[in-house]
Image (spheres, rainbow, N blue to C red):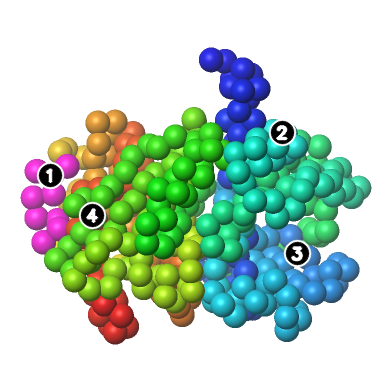
């Protein structure tokens, strides 16, 4: 089927990431953290100085990554209530679409719950069309159509650029965005993305694939036809002790975004830069690197370099991938980042689950939540 025909049959066939909005307790300080630790540049701002009375928002960019950090200026609104319940976390995973109204109609026809109907916002730089639907927990997806807009981000924001003299890690774009949901909710939410977005299942893992002696989880990955936008969905599975998914659900007070995987073209240089900026990563047992090449085959990178930086490797029939996970980005053990470099592979690190879970369990044990 041609690209035009695909778009006609499914208005959500030609989509991409637009931005991720975090609701946080202090947006100015959060923006400084992401700039200093992860090398973002501030490009835009909205707040009292721009006519917005109830909140402040900072727009950060790095290559094709765009984050919006929003804090409330009043004691009781949707932002402050979200932060009081969940802590700092992801509110909106926004999706770039070609036609918001068609995408919205298709989503609603598939059973999506409406948060905001399609509406235009405009200024001297043009107009943007937006609409918002609900997904798991308090998370939403905003559809954004920006083909008629030439401004810095969207109407209501002013260009305000700031950068810090830190190491630039070369983060490129979002690879996938992982949601944690409650017991028995993985399949219904997988069905949601199939019905609402026209996604298909790329891969799934059960508790035999993702488990240790103590904990386990189940996961499935939903993807658009081009594999640009991928949403893995995790749920807990029975184990001897409390899994990382249960810990997340307890601290986040419900379902939400667990982590965002960010692509890089050179993971070694990226991790060196991030470590120099003070970013903390999960550790990996030394034994993981024994006979690494025997498990994953020949790779370009030296095992000693991977061991030194604690980078994990996995392979599928398309190639291999390298990945590493940060520690939680805030006090609650909820949202974190994955840094990933793909060399052909479409996998999600199945071969690394055991080592990753052992590392996470060590952190849980320190927190007394295992």
Q: Which of the two labelled residues, at mark 1 and mark 2, occupies the earlier sequence position?
A: 2
Circle 4 crowding by C-alpha within 10 Å: few under 14, some 14–19, many from 20: some
Q: On screen, 82 above or below 176?
A: below
Circle 1 crowding by C-alpha within 10 Å: few under 14, some 14–19, many from 20: few
Nearer-the-camera pick, 34 or 94 = 94
Percent across and percent down for residue 222 are 44, 41
Q: Are marks 3 and 4 in contact (CB under 8 Å)?
A: no
- For image coordinates 32% across by 68% down, the residue present is 244
Q: Which residue is mark 4?
A: 207
30 sits to left or right of 203? right
Q: On screen, 313 above or below 335?
A: above
- Magenta segment: does it hold 288? yes
Q: Which residue is mark 2?
A: 102
Front: mark 1 or 2: 2
275 sits to left or right of 191? left
Q: Main secondary structure of the magenta part?
A: helix
Measure the alpha-carbon separation of dots 3 and 4: 44 Å
Q: What mark, if any, has residue 295 been given in the picture?
A: 1
Measure the alpha-carbon separation of dots 3 and 1: 48 Å
Residue 35 falls in image quadrant: bottom right
Q: Which residue is mark 3?
A: 45
Q: Which residues are magenta?
A: 287-296
Q: On screen, 179 above or below 84?
A: above
Label 1: element kind: helix
Measure the alpha-carbon separation of dots 1 and 2: 47 Å
311 sits to left or right of 49? left
Front: mark 1 or 4: 4
Percent across and percent down for residue 172 are 50, 47
């Amino acid at each position: 089927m041609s690209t035009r025909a695909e778009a006609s049959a499914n208005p959500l066939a030609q989509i991409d990431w637009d931005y991720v909005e975090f609701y946080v307790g202090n947006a100015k300080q959060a923006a400084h953290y992401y700039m200093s630790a992860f090398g973002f540049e501030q490009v835009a701002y909205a707040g009292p100085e721009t006519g917005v009375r109830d909140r402040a928002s900072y727009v950060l960019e790095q290559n094709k990554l765009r984050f919006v950090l929003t804090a409330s200026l009043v004691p009781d609104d949707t932002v402050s209530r979200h932060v009081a319940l969940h802590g700092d976390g992801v509110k909106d995973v926004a999706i770039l679409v070609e036609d918001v109204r068609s995408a919205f109609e298709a989503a609603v026809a598939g059973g999506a719950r409406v948060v905001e109907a399609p509406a235009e916002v405009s200024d001297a730089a043009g107009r943007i069309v937006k609409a918002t639907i609900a997904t798991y927990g308090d998370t939403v997806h905003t559809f954004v159509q920006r083909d008629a807009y030439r401004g810095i981000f969207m109407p209501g924001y002013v260009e305000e650029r700031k950068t810090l003299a830190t190491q630039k890690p070369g983060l490129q774009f979002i690879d996938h965005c992982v949601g944690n949901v409650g017991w028995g909710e993985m399949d219904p939410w997988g069905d949601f993305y199939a019905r609402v977005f026209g996604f298909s299942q790329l891969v799934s893992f059960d508790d035999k694939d993702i488990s240790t002696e103590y904990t386990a989880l189940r996961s499935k990955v939903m993807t658009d036809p081009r594999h640009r936008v991928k949403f893995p969905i995790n749920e807990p599975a029975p184990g001897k002790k409390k899994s990382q998914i249960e810990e997340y659900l307890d601290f986040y007070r419900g379902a939400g975004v667990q982590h965002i995987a960010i692509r890089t073209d050179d993971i070694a240089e990226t991790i060196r830069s991030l470590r120099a900026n003070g970013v903390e990563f999960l550790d990996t047992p030394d034994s993981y690197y024994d006979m690494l090449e025997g498990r994953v085959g020949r790779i370009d990178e030296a095992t000693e370099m991977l061991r030194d930086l604690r980078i994990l490797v996995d392979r599928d029939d398309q190639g291999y991938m390298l990945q590493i996970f940060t520690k939680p980005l805030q006090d609650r053990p909820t949202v974190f980042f994955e840094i990933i470099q793909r060399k052909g592979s479409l996998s999600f690190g199945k071969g690394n689950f055991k080592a990753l879970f052992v590392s996470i369990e060590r952190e849980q044990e320190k927190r007394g939540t295992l």
